[in-house]
Each structure stands twice: as C-alpha cells, then as structure tokens.
Image (spheres, rainbow, N blue to C red):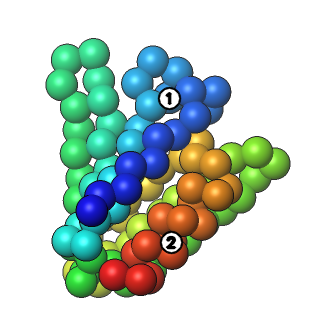
Amino acid sequence: MTEVFVASRWTKNNLLFPTRIEVSQERVLRIKPRAFGRDEESVAISKVASVQISTGLMFSDIRIDSAGGSNPLLSHGHSKADARRIRELVEQY
C-alpha cells in the first residue's frame, strides 16, 4: 500500500506543480511535476538512514538521507501532520 503526501500550493515552487512524496514498503519516492514531464527521486526503505523534519509556523520541510551517502530527498511545504506521518511510515517499514 502506498501513501501519497502532497505539498501545499501556498509554498515556494509549489504553486502550479506541487511536490508529492509517496511512501511504500519498498521505497520513498519524491515526484516534482513540471510543465512537460516530471522529476523523480527515490530511496529504498532499507537504505534510509534518517528522516529530518524542520517545522515552521504552518508548514514543514522534510529531508530524507540515505545510507549510501547519495543526495538526500528534500521537500518543503508539507503540513506538520503529513511530515510526522511520513517519518512514522519510514520508521515502521
């Protein structure tokens, strides 16, 4: 089962094409749509080293680091509840 979390359109760079994070038992996937196509980055659940959440007044930024040392998955503009749920799912899997 995959859970999908969509960033708020009221945050920077998310007005027209909000970022999505999909968490499943196999991987964490960050999808950033564009006018033509989309950018996707994923990390296998077994390779996730840490999940960092930075909360602001209304929204949270999420950073998911991998054990392999590759570039982290970064996403901003998620609700605090969504950020906590993403961390909870990653820790659960």
Tell me the residue that label 1 is attached to.
14
Q: Which mark is residue 66?
A: none
- Residue 33: x %, y % from top left: 30, 29
The label nearer to you, 1 versus 2, is 2
Instruction: Work out which quarter of the rendered image holds the N terminus and state it.
Output: bottom left
Local SS, label 2:
helix
Depth check: 38 or 5 in front? 5
Q: Quadrant of residue 72?
A: bottom left
Q: Residue 66, relative to residue 77: is it above or below?
A: below
User: Residue, x 67% and y 56% (percent of image)?
Assistant: 80
Where does residue 61 sit, x and y in percent of width and height?
Answer: 58, 54
Answer left or right for 58 relative to 24. right
Q: Amino acid at mark 1?
A: Asn
* x 23%, y 59%: residue: 42
The answer to whether one can see residue 69 in this image is no
Quadrant containing the C terminus in the rendered view: bottom left
The earlier-in-sequence mark between 1 and 2 is 1
Q: Is residue 36 above or below residue 48?
A: above
Give the alpha-carbon distance from disc 1 to disc 2, as whole Å: 21 Å
Residue labelled with disc 2: 87
